[in-house]
Image (spheres, rainbow, N blue to C red):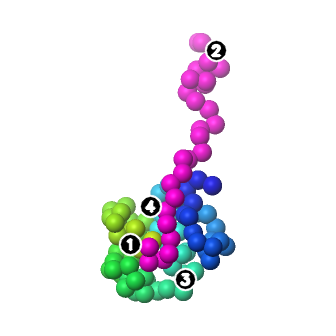
Amino acid sequence: MSGCVDIPGCWSTLTCMDMTSATGLGAQVRTARLGAGMTQQDLARASGVSRLTIGLIERGHPNGEVGKLLAVARALGMGWRLEPLAPAAFSLDSLEQDTDPL
C-alpha cells in the first residue's frame, strides 16, 4: 500500500491513511496518538515538541519541521516508510498515439 506508515505489530489494526498530503499525515499522527491513549500534552512531553506544534501537525499545517515530525513519530513508536505512488493509468505519449489527428 503506498503512503502507509510502518507500524509495529501493536498498531496492526490501524488503517492505512493518505500520506500524500500534510492533512493526511496529520490525521495519521492523530490516530496513532489516540490509539496510544495519549493526549497532545503527553505526546509533546514524550517527543520534546511543544503541544502547539503537535496540534499544528495533526491539523496538517504545511510548515511543520521534518525533525519535529520525526521526533513525534519516534515518541509514538512509529517509523515512516516511503513507497512509490501508484503509477498513472495512462501516459501522455500513449494518449497522443491513440488520438486521431485533427
Secondary structure under the numbered disc 2 in the rendered image = loop
**How far from the left and from the top, in percent, is residue 47?**
38, 79
- Looking at the rendered structure, which numbered label has been put on residue 71? 1
Magenta run includes residue 84: yes
Residue closest to the eye, 6 or 43: 6
| Pointer 3 residue | 36
- Looking at the rendered structure, which numbered label has been put on residue 100? 2
Give the foreground label among 4 and 3. 3
Between discs 1 and 4, the one toward the N terminus: 4
Q: Which residues are magenta?
A: 74-102
| Pointer 4 residue | 22
Q: Is residue 52 visible?
A: no
Q: At 49% across and 86% down in the image, what residue appears?
A: 38
Q: Amino acid at mark 1?
A: Ala
Between discs 4 and 3, the one toward the N terminus: 4
Tell me if residue 73 comes above or below residue 36 in the rendering: above
Tell me the distance, in whole angstroms, between the alpha carbons under discs 2 and 3.
Answer: 57 Å
Tell me if residue 96 comes above or below residue 67 in the rendering: above
Q: At 54% across and 47% down in the image, what residue appears?
A: 84
Between discs 4 and 2, the one toward the N terminus: 4
Secondary structure under the numbered disc 1 in the rendered image = helix
Q: Quadrant of residue 45?
A: bottom left
**How far from the left and from the top, in percent, is residue 80?**
49, 62
Secondary structure under the numbered disc 4 in the rendered image = helix
